[in-house]
Amino acid sequence: MKKHIPNTITCCNLISGCIATYFAFQGDYPLALIFIVIGAVFDFFDGMVARLLHVSSPIGKELDSLADDITFGFAPSAIIFSYLCSFHIHLLFVPFLAFVMAAFSALRLAKFNLDERQALGFIGLPTPANALFWGSLIVGLDLNGYTFEGLEWVILAGMFISCYLLIAEIPMFALKFKHWGWKGNEIKYIFILSCVPILLLLGLFGLAVIIAWYVILSVATNKTTTKPE
C-alpha cells in the first residue's frame, strides 16, 4: 500500500496543474497561480515521502516529470497565452507562441532526469521556479492594470529568455541542506531571509521578484566561486 503514496501525491500535483490550466484559460490568473503553488507543494513532498518510505521507483520518476510539465510547463504557458489574447494582437497566431515554453519545460525535465550533476543543485532554471515567476508576474500586471505600448512583445521576449534559462548550462543553487550550520549555506540562508520581506510587501507578485532574485544570486555566486583558468 505504501508504495502507492508517493505516486498519489504526484498525481495530486498533476491534477493541480490541470485545474490551474482551466483557470488560466478562464482569465482567472490568481486562482491559476494558487493551484500552481499547490502543485509545487505536492511536488516538494512526493520525492521526500518516497525517500522516507524507501519506495522510489522508475515509474515514479517518469510520472513526476509528466506531472511537472503539466503544472510547471503547460499551466504557465496557458496563463501567458490567455493574457496575450487580451491584447487583441493583430497577428492572431502570436499568443500561441506561449506554448513554446511548455516544450522547453519538457526538454528541461528530460535533461534533469538524465543529468547526474544535479543532485545538490540545478543546471538551468528549475521548472517550478519558472512557473511561479510567470504566474506571479501576470497576476501582478493584471491586478494592477499595469500596461504600456508593446508590453505584449516584452512578455514574449521575456518568455523566450526564460526558455533559454530552462536549458542553459548555468549552475543554480537548490534549497537542499547537508547540515543546518551557516558555513556552506550562506547563500541559501540569505535567500530565504530576503524572501520574507519581499512577500510581505508585494504579496503574490513578490514571487516573480523572488525568482528573479534567485537567478541573479545564482549567477553572481557562480561567477565568484568559479576560478579562472
Image (cartoon, rainbow, N blue to C red):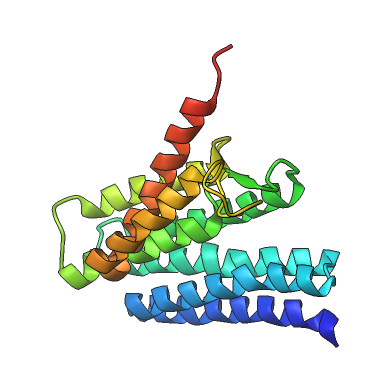
Residue 33, image x, y percentages: 40, 73
Q: Nearer the viewer, residue 65 or 173?
A: 173
Look at the picture and state if 195 lies above or below 111: below
Outermost residue on the top side: it is: 229
Where is residue 65, by image quadrant? bottom right
Q: Tell me the quadrant of the picture where the C terminus can be found.
A: top right
Q: Residue at x 48, y 72 (%)?
A: 36
Outermost residue on the bottom side: it is: 1
Look at the picture and state if 136 lies above or below 224: below
Instruction: Tell whether 122 sits left or right of 156.
Output: right
Residue 52, image x, y percentages: 77, 71
Q: How many numbered discs, if any?
A: 0
Residue 67, image x, y percentages: 64, 70
Q: Nearer the viewer, residue 163 or 212?
A: 212
Q: Residue at x 70, y 69 (%)?
A: 48
Q: Nearer the viewer, residue 116 or 114?
A: 116
Look at the picture and state if 172 lies above or below 73: above
Residue 4, image x, y percentages: 80, 82
Q: Nearer the viewer, residue 134 or 154?
A: 134
Q: Tell me the quadrant of the picture where the N terminus can be found.
A: bottom right
Where is residue 98, by image quadrant? bottom left
Q: Residue at x 77, y 67 (%)?
A: 51
Where is residue 78, by image quadrant? bottom left
Q: From where the camera sits, is residue 151 visible? A: yes
Instruction: Tell whether 131 sits left or right of 26.
Output: right
